[in-house]
Amino acid sequence: MDHAPAQTNLGKNIFFEETKKSGDSLNRHVMNSGVMYENGTDGPQDFRKAKALYEMAAERGNVTALYNLALIYEQGKGSIPRDSRKAIELWTRAAKKGDSLSNIQLGYMNEHGIGISAPDPVKAAEWY
């Protein structure tokens, strides 16, 4: 008698239980897959796939994914158009969750007036 399907399902259940216990390792895996697509690790670069994976991880609260997604928008990678305002929105969300790299980016954007109407040294200092 073949028990392979039952063993496979048992393995999946154990995996998902361990994922719950490990503090969302599946979310980190999704984010890391985005990094692989963005950098072209193990294949060609695909910024659209990277963006989709970062969005998925960001929706689940991954601040590194928010940061990386903002970089894609700020730099306008591949066929994704540059959108400094969207980058600021994403970095602001990440900064509010405690991401210090996003604070630095927001300070820089405000200091140089990128994605805003004019440079704002006071706001830049607040972010730095």
Image: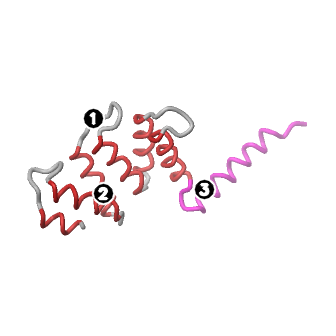
Identify the residue at horizontal 49%, vertical 37% (top origin). Answer: 40
Q: Nearer the viewer, mark 1 or mark 3?
A: 1
Query: Which circle's residue, 1 or 3, is located before the other in the chain?
Result: 3
Give the overall secondary structure of the magenta segment. helix
Numbered tag placed on residue 93 in the rendering: 2
Q: Which residue is mark 3?
A: 19
Q: Which residues are magenta?
A: 1-25
Q: Nearer the viewer, mark 3 or mark 2?
A: 2
Which one is in front, 43 or 14? 43
Which type of secondary structure does the marked residue at label 3 adopt?
helix
Mark 3 residue type: Thr
Query: Which circle's residue, 3 or 2, is located before the other in the chain?
Result: 3
Identify the residue at horizontal 47%, vertical 45% (top origin). Answer: 35
Q: Is residue 91 left or right of residue 50?
A: left
Q: Is residue 54 left or right of residue 120?
A: right
**Where does the image place residue 15, in percent across and percent down from the top left?**
66, 52
For the C terminus, the quadrant is bottom left
Tell me how far mark 3 sits from mark 2, CA to CA: 25 Å
